[in-house]
Image (cartoon, helix red, strand yellow):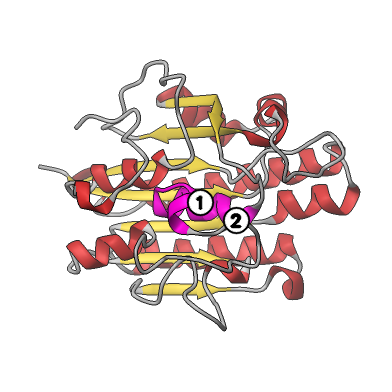
Amino acid sequence: MLTPKVLVIGIDGIRPDVLMDVHTPHIDRLAAEGILTNQAMTGYPSVSGPGWSSMLNGVWPDKHGVTDNSFDGERYNDFPDFLTRIEQIRPELETFAVADWAPLGYSDQGSPTISDAVDVKHVLDGYELGWAEADAKSVQLAVEQLETSNPDALFVYLGNPDEISHEHSSIGSEYRDAIALADEHVGVLVKAVRDRVTYPEEDWLILSSTDHGRRSDGGHGGNSEEERTIYFLANGPSVIATTPPDSTYIVDVAVTALTHLRIQIDPSWRLDGKPVGILR
């Protein structure tokens, strides 16, 4: 039996209709081999704090408690991120996370979104390094982990597209170039997975999604369709290559990852998500 493993690639602030319009050969290849919907939904408010908390923890803000980017009111001890959940249930599995938006991995009050229970966690500062450089460094760290260790579950965050759109108050050429660059990073990560010596013995699920969409002026935070519509991508031998369900949500990412790793979802966890697109 193949060993299940999962790589979750989170790309900040991707409006799915723009994603569909940009030349993204690596994402397109994953979609052609698996499933991609550009009609998934995130919650409200459509900002990063609650968005990433919902994706990584598998519950909506009424449970994880995060309603803005201050992270005040977080209840991560009750509703931990999926990597921490793995450590709690199957501590023998190796977990890895890298993020260049620091609040995801570091907090000077309360708990960060991704807890310190994760085996290997890198927290970079995109504002200090520059977002393009920080994303490249994040990918490099993930590739090194895939090449030199035996991770079972990884989360890689890419922040540059969101920051570029904010910087230019637009979803124009600069934003589209940033999406194309993120696609190149996706290609590097997928190659690192498939170049592993042990890859023939492994069943890799590659998931990718985003925390929110955006308006044409680059802003977000509201309840409009443009701000709340996101994409959901799944690729791997266990993925059922068919049309994904219309009702796909950001909270489904964590539950899909856990289910692929053969971790039984306990009803007492009160997760809101469901597994999407995979054999169970």
Name which of mark 2 and mark 1 comes first in the sequence. Answer: 1
| Type of the residue with mark 2 | Thr
Q: Secondary structure at mark 2?
A: loop
In terms of depth relative to the viewer, which is nearer, 63 or 17? 63
Tag 2 and tag 1, C-beta contact below 8 Å: yes
Is 222 on the left-hand or right-hand side of 245? Answer: right
Q: Which residue occupies 74% across, 46% down? A: 178
Q: Secondary structure at mark 1?
A: helix
| Type of the residue with mark 1 | Pro
Which x, y percent locates residue 38? 57, 25
**Start and end of the magenta stretch?**
48-64
Q: Is residue 151 visible?
A: no
Which label sits on residue 253?
none
Which label sits on residue 67?
2
Give the residue at mark 1: 61
Q: Which residue occupies 49% across, 66% down? A: 74
Q: Which residue occupies 33% across, 65% down? A: 84
Q: Which residue occupies 55% across, 57% down? A: 157
Q: Is residue 256 visible?
A: yes
In terms of depth relative to the viewer, which is nearer, 146 or 125? 125
Residue lying at the far bottom of the rendered structure: 108
